[in-house]
Image (cartoon, rainbow, N blue to C red):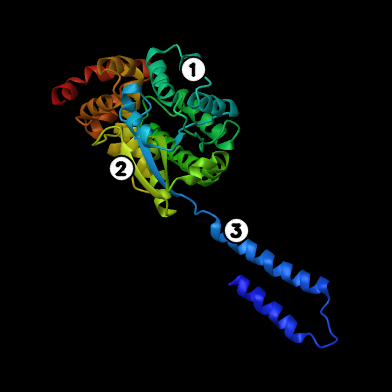
Amino acid sequence: MIWKEIRSFKETLEERKGPQEEVAPSIEGALHQGLEDKFNKTLEQERKPEEPKISIKIFYSPHGSAKDLKGLKEEFAKCDIFIPEGYAWTKGDLEILRGLSFGKIRPFIIVTDKNRIAKERMKFPEEMIYNSQKPIALIDVPENHPIVKEIKNYESEMKGKKIFHYGNFAQTMESFKKALAEEAFLEKEREEYMLSQLKPQVDALLNEYPNLRDKQGISILLSLGVSHTSLYHSLKKENFEVTRIFNKMPFVYPYRNEVVRRYLFGKSVDDLLLSRALTEVLFWEAFGAQLDENEGHDSQKIAEFTRRLISAFSFDEIKNMFEGASKFDEWPSFLYMNLKKGFETS
């Protein structure tokens, strides 16, 4: 089409020449060059390959032991790009992950956690990633982001047990409700940041690894904690091609996670559910280590057992147990005396 325009234009120039006339060569050349540039630009655009189709799969699992990552290795083998959860990550963390992927760093060098279970959980993805030659990105909030400071402040208050007012169940329930609502708000902020970073980080990898553009389709695997399922729905709303799987189905959420998720999705939380989540937090604080050992460090088994146990108690029974203790040190023994019903039911 462009060359027809060039030929037609040249013929017009010839026709316009009189017996004694000549069109200035510089003008004719400039116009000819302009049309040729236009043609070359159009041709370049036509030859530009289409962006590969991108599909996303999210692997959801608890943050417990290596057992919680069952199935991740198989999904990782099928992906082109891997994006693990990376709360408060640093530039050095990303360099380590990429170093592992391209065989520049060996897994045992960076596993430093002294806790055996935590060490095994860390070692599993490191060995999975090692020398896989897969591009890796992080879309989570980095270390210096304001959201990290907010989350750390929240976690400090929870660890300090400032929300628990022993002997005053109503006040504790109100404080606990506000705390979990704040947790949901912070998680929402964090997920909105992840959503905003996904496309820019993937585009950066496509530029860094141009061979990815030769693929008809690019498979991205996100590995996230089970609390982040609202990100899946956000990606769907943004018209991403996205699917999700859990490390175990059907998946059973702990009471606390259920409350936070309900707040995230704008759903109501009744007093019974909130009181059970409160009891669950206190129960794990008192017996968590023993329960973890008894259930073989399997987060799903722990959640299932705890829910069966606590669901045996009514709201009034939970209230009476809490108000019977004037401080946390008294609560476990007071609870233990009332557990017979729970154990018999479970």
Work out whether residue 222 can be spotted. Answer: yes
Which label number is shown at residue 44? 3
Q: Position of residue 322 (x, y in %)?
A: 31, 25
The total of numbered circles placed on residues is 3
Q: Which residue lies at the image location 44% right of the left edge and 28% below the top edge?
A: 132
Would you say residue 161 is visible in this rendering? no
Q: Disc 3 and disc 1: Cα gap in Å?
A: 44 Å
Frontmost residue, 316 versus 298:
298
Mark 1 and mark 2: span between their CA atoms?
Answer: 49 Å
- Image disc number at residue 239: none
Look at mark 2 in the image and give the residue it sits on: 270
Image coordinates of residue 286 in percent, x first then y, are 33, 18
Which residue is located at x 54 percent, y 42 percent?
A: 210
Q: Give the structural element (helix, strand or loop) at label 2.
A: loop
Instruction: Please name which of the two marks, 3 or 1, marks the residue nearer to the observer.
Output: 3
In the structure shown, which secondary structural element does the residue marked by tag 1 occupy? loop
Q: Nearer the viewer, residue 345 or 336?
A: 345
The amino acid marked with disc number 3 is Glu
Q: Position of residue 41 (x, y in %)?
A: 63, 62
The numbered mark at residue 106 is 1
Q: Residue furthest right?
A: 20
> For the C terminus, which image quadrant?
top left
Counting other residues with Cα less than 10 Å from the Cα at mark 3, is it few (<14), some (14-19), or many (20 or more)?
few
Q: Nearer the viewer, mark 3 or mark 2?
A: 3
Residue 85 occupies which quadrant of the picture? top left
- The numbered mark, 3 or 1, whose residue comes first in the sequence reads 3
